[in-house]
Amino acid sequence: MKIALSIAGSDPTGGAGLQADLKVFRSLDVHGLSVVSAITAQNTEGVYSVLPVDKSFFEKQLHILLSDIRPDAVKTGMLYSRWAVEIISKILREYSLSNLVVDPVTVSSSGTSLVEDGTLEALREKLFPLSKLITPNIHEASMLTGIMIKDKKSMENAAKVLKDMGPEAVVITGGHLEEIAQDLYYDGEFHPFEVEKIKGEYHGTGCAFSAAVTAFLANRYSTLESVRRAKDFVIKAIKKAYHPGRGMGLLYL
């Protein structure tokens, strides 16, 4: 069985973060490893507080785990602190890990900031050049590039700027465009993915998508094919979403 590692925050609802990543890995027949970067107080209505784990303990989690088990692919989600990015960058090199997927989580669906000052710069400088794929949504891509994405052309421009930051490929997820759900994959050539937008608000779609890509990369699919398969996986999960709380729906993973 292939192995994937998620380095991300904990979500008590199970709809996003580490908990969702592990569900996705299991659904796709990949053994999931996890290292906690932060804990959160949240529910289906929003994120109320974020607490990063201790710096030395974060690093210790990674060293102890990786000294024993080697993952076939690695995903980062919410990292919150600049030092977390720097530690991951160092450890990726130390253990010669490949197939890195970076989901540059910046703000929760409810608008809460999920990074401290300097983390975005560290992502651009330290992790993007080591990554197989980065998976920002439109809002995150706009923050990272300074380009206000409002149409296909601006999405393409942002993808080019992001690719120049060092990743092998970029996929900008476009669920926030009005008419359609549009993702744009770019590895030097553009590959658009368009589907009809599904009505409603759903928690953890970005986490599930990047985790699915990671699982498919672990199983040795190409990056583009991993994105295609992950897109189909998430659409099916949204269509089966359920509402255990008062807020956003949770994907059926």
Image (cartoon, rainbow, N blue to C red):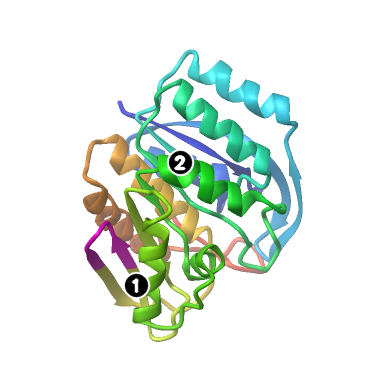
Specify the principal SS of the magenta part.
Answer: strand
Name the side, left or right, on which 167 lies relative to 79. Answer: left
Question: Which type of secondary structure does the marked residue at label 2 adopt?
Answer: strand
Residue at horizontal 24 percent and vertical 66 percent from the top: 190
Q: Which residues are magenta?
A: 184-191
Q: Which residue is mark 1?
A: 156
Q: Is residue 189 magenta?
A: yes
Q: Nearer the viewer, residue 248 or 63?
A: 63
Give x and y (percent) for residue 8: 57, 42
Q: How many marks?
A: 2
Q: Nearer the viewer, residue 93 or 54?
A: 93
Name the side, left or right, on which 109 lies relative to 214. Answer: right
Q: Can you say which quadrant of the picture contains the N terminus?
A: top left
Counting residues from the N terminus, which is met first, the one under dot 1 or under dot 2? 2
Question: Which type of secondary structure does the marked residue at label 1 adopt?
Answer: helix
State the image quarter where residue 46 is shown. bottom right
Q: Is residue 253 visible?
A: no
